[in-house]
Image: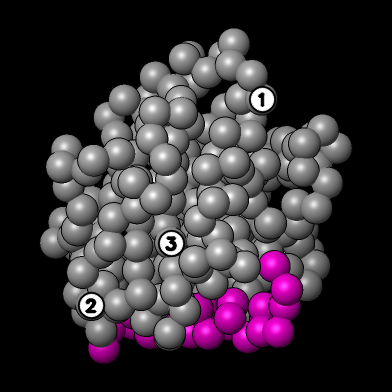
Amino acid sequence: MGKIIAVFNQKGGVGKTTTAVNLAAAVAAAGQRTLLVDLDPQGNATSGVGVDKRQAAASTYELLIGEAVPQAAVVTTAFQNLSVIPCSTRLAGAEIELVDANRRENRLKAALAALREQYDYVFIDCPPSLGLLSLNALCAADTFLVPLQCEYYALDGMSQLMATVRQVKRLYNPALDLEGVVLTMYDGRLNLTQQVVAEVKKFFPRKVFGTPIPRSVRLSEAPSYGQPIHYYDRGGKGAKAYAALAEELINKNKGGVF
């Protein structure tokens, strides 16, 4: 049964979608059957794996409002072992449509329950907010992964994020756990970076992945070509970093029953 990991940070610009796309692709390239779920109304994870959301028969929007069966929303990408449930432009209105819905926080969990046997890992790209879409992701997930940029305000908002997670655990998903923190936009030459790393490790003891993700122009370019970095610039530092992060994640979960 596949492990469901929500890639979550309510703060924008931290490398959340970049991590969701490239970590999912790297895990898939390592031989794991992988599903990427685009729950961010911006739809960048969908285009990042070369899928045109306008051509999709169904999307996360239809799953949440109950207009599609889960299997109908899955799109096989051009990349090894990687499938995606794309985003639709209508997803932005889903929170309003679901406001009076029965068990609205468990819509995604119910949809993914029918799919998780087919995959080793399911990654959910969450929106940069603490609304109903993110709540659905956290209710569906076994763990959540936090991308955190190596900049001055790195931990700004993390207390609010963790308070939200504690509330989700208490009310909806007692088993939800922190998969780990991924340091993004890393530049080891800077003193500030080392200070931020030390601060993050103090805030999240034993939960920070050993592989940081460096700043990379190629990582920024890859989405415009609809390719994860593993395929766009296989030998580059960004691809190597996500491959190492994928290996770390897989080894961490090896032998685990999800």
Assign a secondary structure to mark 2: helix
SS category of the residue bearing label 1: loop
> Considering the numbered disc 3 on the image, is that residue within a helix, a strand or a loop?
strand
Q: Who is closer to the viewer here, 208 or 154?
A: 208
Closer mark to the observer between disc 2 and disc 1: 1
> In this figure, which residue is indicated by the disc labeled 3?
35
Q: Is residue 255 visible?
A: yes
Q: Could you tell me what secondary structure mostly forms the magenta stretch?
A: helix
Residue at 34%, 46% (x, y): give it. Answer: 72
The part of the chain drawn in magenta is 235-258
Q: CA distance from mark 2 to mark 1?
A: 40 Å
- Residue under label 1, please give it: 103
Mark 3 surroundings: few (<14), some (14-19) or many (≥20) residues within 10 A: many
- How far apart in space, not on screen, are marks 2 and 3 (Cα)? 17 Å
Q: Cα distance, mark 1 to mark 3? A: 24 Å
Quarter of the image for the N terminus: give it: bottom right
Q: Quadrant of residue 27?
A: bottom left
Where in the figure is residue 139, as x and y percent of width and height? 67, 41
What number is the disc on residue 232?
none
Q: Which residue is mark 2?
A: 231
Q: Is residue 109 above or below residue 200?
A: above
Residue 134 falls in image quadrant: top right
Q: Amino acid at mark 2?
A: Tyr
Tag 3: amino acid: Leu
* Whole-percent x, y for residue 137 in the image: 58, 43
In screen coordinates, is 11 left or right of 225? Answer: right
Pointer 2 or 3: first along the chain:
3
7 displayed left or right of 225? right
* Residue 216 is a magenta residue: no
Task: Give the camera-side residue of 111 and 8.
Answer: 111
Q: Is residue 228 above or below residue 88?
A: below
Residue that lies at the very extreme toward the top in this rendered image: 100
